[in-house]
Image (tube, rainbow, N blue to C red):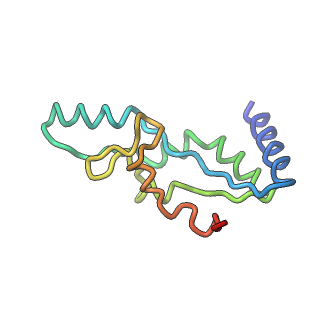
Amino acid sequence: MESEFSREYVNTVCEISENHPVYIVRPIPEMPFSIYKGLSLKARLFQGTSDISSPLEHHEKRTKVANLAIDAAAEKCKAQIIDPIPYLCPNGQCMGSKDGESLYYDDNHLVDHGNVQLKGLFKGILRPL
């Protein structure tokens, strides 16, 4: 199943890249639970705030198959990889919140505060029209 996924992914990327430049964004880290709800619960139970994070190694394990397919497509099809991990997972921890504010709407969709962490991700890639 994994090899079929990878093969079809690479074929699709290569087909697109025949006529267009292709940029692939690696997966955004998924948190183990809803960060917004987790922060609310922490505040109610412990009368304070602290940030929530998840180990980078959990994200790497969860996205291994997808990242192998992305790497294969980038190599074979001349696609460019855009990696959000340096922005969201400093020091081996993927941030679910920062300064007590959730970066996620739930466990895998960034809110505006999360998107702000990606500032600079596309620098040097997108050109003004």
Q: Picture coordinates of residue 56 (x, y %)?
A: 46, 49
Q: Is residue 36 left or right of residue 79?
A: left
Quarter of the picture containing the C terminus is: bottom right
Q: Is residue 123 left or right of residue 55?
A: right
At horizontal 38% and vertical 50% (from top left) the residue drawn is 113
Residue at the left extreme? 47
Q: 108 or 66, which is in the foreground?
A: 108
Q: Is residue 27 left or right of residue 58?
A: right
Establish if 89 lies above or below 27: below
Examine the image and state in which quarter residue 63 appears.
top right
At horizontal 69% and vertical 55% (from top left) the residue drawn is 23
Q: Picture coordinates of residue 118 (x, y %)?
A: 48, 57
Q: Picture coordinates of residue 51 (x, y %)?
A: 28, 47
Q: How many marks?
A: 0
Examine the image and state in which quarter residue 89 appears.
bottom left
Q: Is residue 42 left or right of residue 85?
A: left
Quarter of the picture containing the N terminus is: top right
